[in-house]
Image: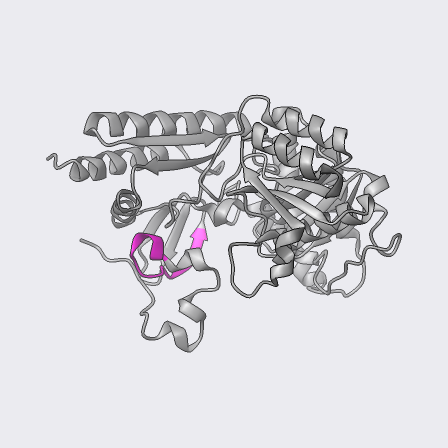
Amino acid sequence: MASTTVMPRRRAPRGLVGGVNSPVRAFRHVGAEPLLLETAKGVIVTDRNGRRLTDFIMGWGAIILGHNPAPVVRALRERTRRGVLLGLTHQGEFELASRIIRAVPSVQQVRFTVSGSEACLIAARLARAHTKREKILLFDGCYHGHGDSLIVGHSAGLPRALESQVATVPFNHLERLEDVLRREGEHIAAILVEPVPANMGVVLPAEGFLRQLRELTRRYGIVLIFDEVVTGFRLGRAGAQGYFGVTPDLTTFGKIIGGGLPIGAVGGPERLMSLLAPEGPVYHGGTFAGHPLSMAAGCAVLDLLEAEPPYAALQRRLARLQKGLEQAAARAGVPLRVSAIGSMATAFFSSRARFAEWANALRRAGILVPPSPFEAMFLSSAHRDSDIDRLISATAQSLRTMAGQP
């Protein structure tokens, strides 16, 4: 059985905490060692021993055209030739902003950040400034980065005073939401929501849930923020708001709009965005905001998504994946449900142990899925039916093994 390159735990702490720079990369949810990759092209990532794996992580959703598509590489080479960091505003910032505005009707102006986490913090700050209220309402299981006020209850080192500034309710639970709003609605500045949560696994919004959110926020004068860091330009060029036909007040972006480079953005109507400095009193700034390389890569990706939309093909392949995995599970008698939308999916097993067994078996078979039951698999336009079929076949074999079948 071929082995996969891993970083030895005894050496990793010398330079990196836990051997990683983001916890999910530690593979601890599946009881394995961190995987050390070297190259990526199309749907294939390669480790230090030259072992090739078909990738269904796709940069945690940031990659939608496959790794290193030629137009993105060309754009980066050209931008690097003209300067990597300029320090002042450059034309690329206007060009990427115009592409986002053209694709997403709710957005009139954009402010770029360095990450989705930063974008969500700025969106919350804008909402507080606009409403003169302090509290933010979040949904259990939704992830909006690691900013203090957006990760209350999920990290050590936070001031206890932040707890009074955050309300939480279960996702898809309108009755609980309405109860909180009746009691605290006049104190809530914003409702921040992933329209399709992807960090407790992919969870679809219940029929009418997002429309009801829109109605309730208008009734109580609350700013509705869609965190589309994952769904933006993945469920369509207009993201989840276009897919579901619900218009938020503010939207946060990331991942796909950077073409594989670090990025985040806040977008919305001028009446809210003009509160940002230098036009208004809400401060935000950053050395790397609007970085030339991120702008160049983002423009290249969004141009391709507009010229050759991949969404119908992605949805077809995702349906093939979902059906194939669930049929394999039914034949093996192993409980499994696949939650899927657009080009993102999560395989929900009956236990974390079974998920780990599946993920590790696939990796041994040369297929890379997220090493956590709380993350999503992502498809790209570079995936082919044969890649989907390999995933289904390897899954069928692993499920037969789980069930004690030959």
Horizontal side of residue 228 vs 82, given as left or right: left
Horizontal side of residue 334 vs 275, given as left or right: left
Give me the residue at 48% from left, 38% from top. Answer: 380
Toward the viewer: 370 or 339? 339
Give the residue at the far left of this rendering. Answer: 406
**Which residues are the magenta region?**
27-40
Asked if residue 208 lies in the magenta stretch, the reply is no
Quarter holding the C terminus is: top left
The scheme the figure's colours follow is one colour
Vertical relation: 260 (above or below) 177: below
Q: Position of residue 6 (x, y in %)?
A: 32, 63
Give the residue at the far right of this rendering. Answer: 279
Q: Position of residue 46 (x, y in %)?
A: 37, 55
Toward the viewer: 207 or 2? 207
Count of marks, rendered view: 0
Horizontal side of residue 135 vs 11, given as left or right: right
Q: Position of residue 44 (x, y in %)?
A: 40, 48
Give me the residue at 64% from left, 49% from top. Answer: 166
Asked if residue 35 lies in the magenta stretch, the reply is yes
Horizontal side of residue 17 vs 399, given as left or right: right
User: Can see residue 385?
Assistant: no
Vertical relation: 274 (above or below) 293: above
Toward the viewer: 399 or 363? 399
